[in-house]
Image: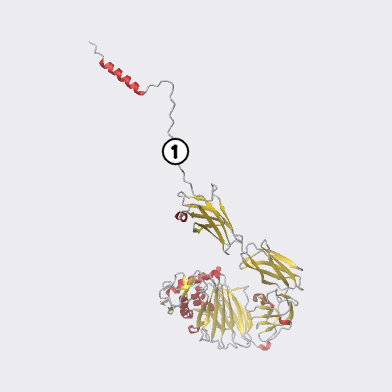
Amino acid sequence: MRPTVGTLLVLMLLLAGLGHAPPSLDEAQVVLVEGRQMEDVNCTGMTFEDLFAYDNATFDVAVDGSWSAASITATARASDQRAADVRADLDGLFDGFPGGNDSWISTDERDAVREVGPSCIADMSTRITLHEGASVRTIGDDANEVRFVEDGLALDERDLIPSDHPEYRTCPRPFASSSCREVPVSATQALEIDLMVAEDASANAAFERLEDPDGTPFTIAIVATNMTNASMRLTFPSLAGLTLVGSEVQDDGNAVLNQDAPLVGQTSDGRLQVDLNLTYPLDEWPMERVLYLDFTTEDLSSNSAPEWLTDAPDNGTRFSLPPGINTATIAASDVAGWGFDQHGWSLSCEGAEGWNVSRTNLGTVVIARGEGLGGDVICGLVDGYGMVSDEQRTWSIVQPFTFDANLTTERHVLVEVNPAAEAGFTLAATLEQGTRSGAVQSMPVLSTTVFDHSSEGMLPGSLSWSVRISGNGWWIMEFLLDIDVVLPNAAPSLSIEPALDGSNGTWNALGTSALVRGYAVDPEGEPLTVMWRLCGAGDEATLQGEAWEADIKTIACDQQGINTYVVEITATDASGGETSISTSLDPPVAEVPEPVSPPAEEPQSRSFIPHPGLFASVLCLAIAAVLSRPSDP
């Protein structure tokens, strides 16, 4: 929950920095000494959600017997997909300090956050207020607000600096502590951030005492704005007749329908517990969402027994526990409609040979295996003050089938199901592997039944079998079963595509490298790496879809005096399966110019052709004759 308790976690978030950097952080006086110590910061006005966009979070708020203090604990979780963002944001918070914002997150940075955390959280608002009176629907400036107490606060984390990361190392910077270790912020291991009560404290939050809560109704308001996936449990001191009489969610002051109702229960020592699921539609930001809870005390002399509701399993209903499954859980949301009592209710069951049904404080129902293949359980509803329902119901818990699974040579998984005495149910089944799943097959099981599952799309490794059991008289239940089948790795296929001239590569103009192309395909669809090697040298080919291209250089061969080019191409999948092929690259042949022949002499003609010089001679003789002739008298 991020409302109230969420705020507390704000600094916790500082530790996880998975979200929006708080605007006031730039103004905060954060002093880092030798990379390990930080002074006080001012986080007034911040909330947990300003700093940490968790995948899911749980909050636990326990009011103490004085009705003036509380213990607030919380755990915020970041999945593998979000964890790298958390580490990067946290590293960025230390920009300007030794080791800060350097793409590595260290134990020194973590310890610095632990130091400054309680001081920052103490400035934040829990967003939880208490109001005397029935059905209060306003939060005034003088609200009785739950406040954090710095001396009672502590922070911790799990796997922020995962020691099993392959790049886990000693911090190389000056001023780092001798024990400093760090990992790159790109590390994807999931992590958790915890808000706790300090070891030497009994509470970490306080509020003004409620006036005589024993006889006065009161309302708790929780601002749930921006809380997208959180759960909160409120636990109150033992007080006879204390009960939740109403609740309401308001968005910008308007009542919202179709919200999950709070689940009410009691601890073994009689303390009232209220469990809440907090959600928020992010597309409606900055709409304000507030959850109101109305409490009162009442005269227990008029206490009535709990009642079964229409959603409860009928007499004779069968619950399933397949082979290898010792306990099964039914979600609290599916159980909430089984019964009703204003003081909360639980199950009181008696079963033979250890078979049993029970309801936890979180509202979930647990089905437990006993001896043999099945047993009957007789159950009644019991309220928080021990009053049992007038009606009891008898249910059966059975192992509905046995199975055997095998992998065929065609990589199909055959699961043979043999029903027990309790036949007549339907199985909807599919193969699963992490986030991958196959096509669902649904068949009634009246006798031996075989499910034939294709492993297409699955990766090498262990496979699980997901089944959903339903049928007339059967409570619908889902299980993920270990079928002891391991899908072997199939090596990728690899080929070379001839060039236009039919050769295996296209040489550059200098003859120093050849461009070779081809295709590589992995049967399971795993990512591939294609490498080439020639004369001891090599590099990675570029890969686009199934097509690869390698620019193969011959310099290593030339340096060794090798003029025969035999290149090896290897495709490797993510599971280590590989395929190699070798091919020869014919060296480019230098083009030798053809010799130019002199022009052939033309054959002489039989007719006489005077030489040009002859005409010149005749002309000169004619001119001389004219010049030597005597002139006329």
Mark 1: which secondary structure? loop
- Residue for point 50% across, 53% down: 565
* Quadrant the C terminus occupies: top left
* Quadrant the N terminus occupies: bottom right
Alpha-carbon neighbours of circle 1 within 10 Å: few (<14), some, or many (≥20)? few
Furthest residue in direction front, as rendered: 561
**Which residue is tagged 1?**
595
Residue 588, horizontal then vertical, whole percent = 49, 48
Mark yes or no: residue 142 visible: no
Residue 437, horizontal then vertical, whole percent = 64, 65
Residue 341, horizontal then vertical, whole percent = 67, 82
Q: How is the image coloured?
A: secondary structure
Comparing 300 with 320, the one in front is 320
* Type of amino acid under label 1: Pro
Residue 204, horizontal then vertical, whole percent = 51, 83
Mark yes or no: residue 532 visible: yes
Furthest residue in direction left, as rendered: 633
Answer above or below: position of 590 versus 140.
Answer: above
Answer above or below: position of 248 versus 486.
Answer: below
User: Quarter of the image holding residue 99?
Assistant: bottom left
Give the number of marks. Answer: 1
Comparing 467 with 394, the one in front is 467
